[in-house]
Amino acid sequence: MSEYTGDVTLNGGIETPVRMSGLEDMYVQPDSIDGDLDLRNVEYVFTGVPITPAADVADPVTDITGTLEDGYTEPDGVHGDLAVGTAEDVFIAHGAVDGALSARGPEQVFDAGTSDAPSRDPATYDVTVSGWQQQREVTDPNTGVVLSGCQSTVNVTGATGSVSCYLIGTNNELIVRGDAAVEVHIVGRDNRVDLGPYIDVDTAVETGFDNTIDVQPFPADDLIETTEDEAYSAVTFGRAKVTYQSVAEDEDWCRGCGEAADAIIERQQKEAFFILGTPIITYEEGGGSYECEHCAHSAPDTSLTPEERREIF
């Protein structure tokens, strides 16, 4: 029997079967256990792996106990079976366990089943952040990010193409900025994903509760091709007709296409006599042509629905 204090991480260098007892929380990353996982007397189980009949885990070769805090299994971290006795929350990613997963006597199980698998294997993501209160800056990810643990923050910038994000645990925050299709999977509770206005949520799956995905509103100024001041400044002297756009502040649906929208502009025109960019005499002015991020010529392509844009969960 091995006595430990604090957090315990299984990273492949320990004999199996393994038993861990008296944990606070347990975080099981993708592709980390190539045998069975048997949970006994745990409270909440959040899992992307379907619960199966009782796992047949032999008596442990390695028995980990002591004054334990949290437990972590890294990818390829357990070459055999693992038994966990007495823990509060256990968070298990999809594809974490090659063998059977059993949970005996849990207070509640949040099970995603098999249909919610990520489109690409989380083991292939290019960034993994694990632990308690971790902080990480990620630039230009190629495939994706795994965030596992509690109260950690990952800030992703420059995301392009297709990027996957997998959150495992509780009270984590993932911030993504760029122009990309982002696939989000969450196993846990009280996690937050903050996506920029040019992010398209390709797939969003939640196993747990009180998780949110927030998409920042589209900036209306990005739809404006010519401001009023720019239109006026182009005329030095004489009578001219100018066209410009302004933000339609009080509109929440587009009169042009009929869609609910975050960003709406009104195209306006004025015919006037100008001196050095200042209208002196106005002959005619008006507007009434509306565009939003869905239909404006200057808007980038986006497939977000209004509901996705405000809050996915």
Image (cartoon, helix red, strand yellow):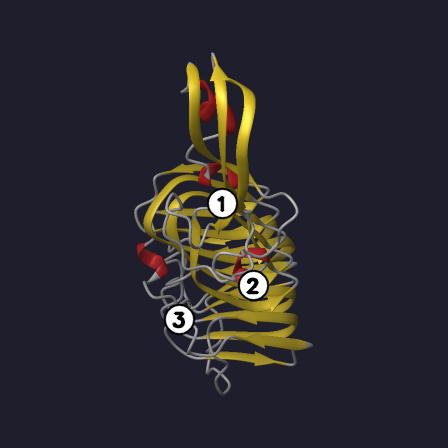
Is 61 placed left or right of 264 in the picture?
left
- At 34% across and 39% down in the image, what residue appears? 140
Residue at the bottom extreme of this rendering: 53
Tell me where residue 302 sits by quadrant.
Answer: bottom left
- At 46% across and 59% down in the image, what residue appears? 304
Q: Could you say whether the residue bearing mark 2 is in a helix, strand or loop?
A: helix
- At 58% across and 63% down in the image, what residue appears? 188
Q: Position of residue 30 (x, y in %)?
A: 40, 62
Q: Position of residue 22 (x, y in %)?
A: 65, 62
Tell me the crowding category of disc 3: few under 14, some 14 to 19, or many 20 or more residues within 10 angstroms, Cα based: some
Task: State which mark lies toward you, 1 or 3.
Answer: 1
Q: Position of residue 282 (x, y in %)?
A: 55, 27
For the residue pair 164 and 196, the one nearer the viewer reads as: 196
Q: Which residue is mark 2?
A: 307
Tell me the crowding category of disc 1: few under 14, some 14 to 19, or many 20 or more residues within 10 angstroms, Cα based: some
Q: Which mark is residue 117?
A: 3
Q: Quadrant of the N terminus?
A: bottom right
Task: State which mark lies toward you, 3 or 2.
Answer: 2
C-beta proximity under 8 Å, tags 3 and 2: no
For the residue pair 107 and 226, the one nearer the viewer reads as: 226
Query: Which amino acid lies under the numbered mark 1 shown in the image of this protein?
Result: Gly
Q: Could you say whether the residue bearing mark 3 is in a helix, strand or loop?
A: loop
Is 140 placed left or right of 169 in the picture?
left
CA–CA distance in space, label 1 to label 3: 24 Å
Q: Earlier in the sequence, mark 2 or mark 1?
A: 1
Q: Quadrant of the C terminus?
A: bottom right
Q: Is residue 125 visible?
A: yes
Query: Which amino acid lies under the numbered mark 3 shown in the image of this protein?
Result: Ala
Q: Which residue is mark 1?
A: 196
CA–CA distance in space, label 3 to label 2: 23 Å
Q: Is residue 135 visible?
A: no
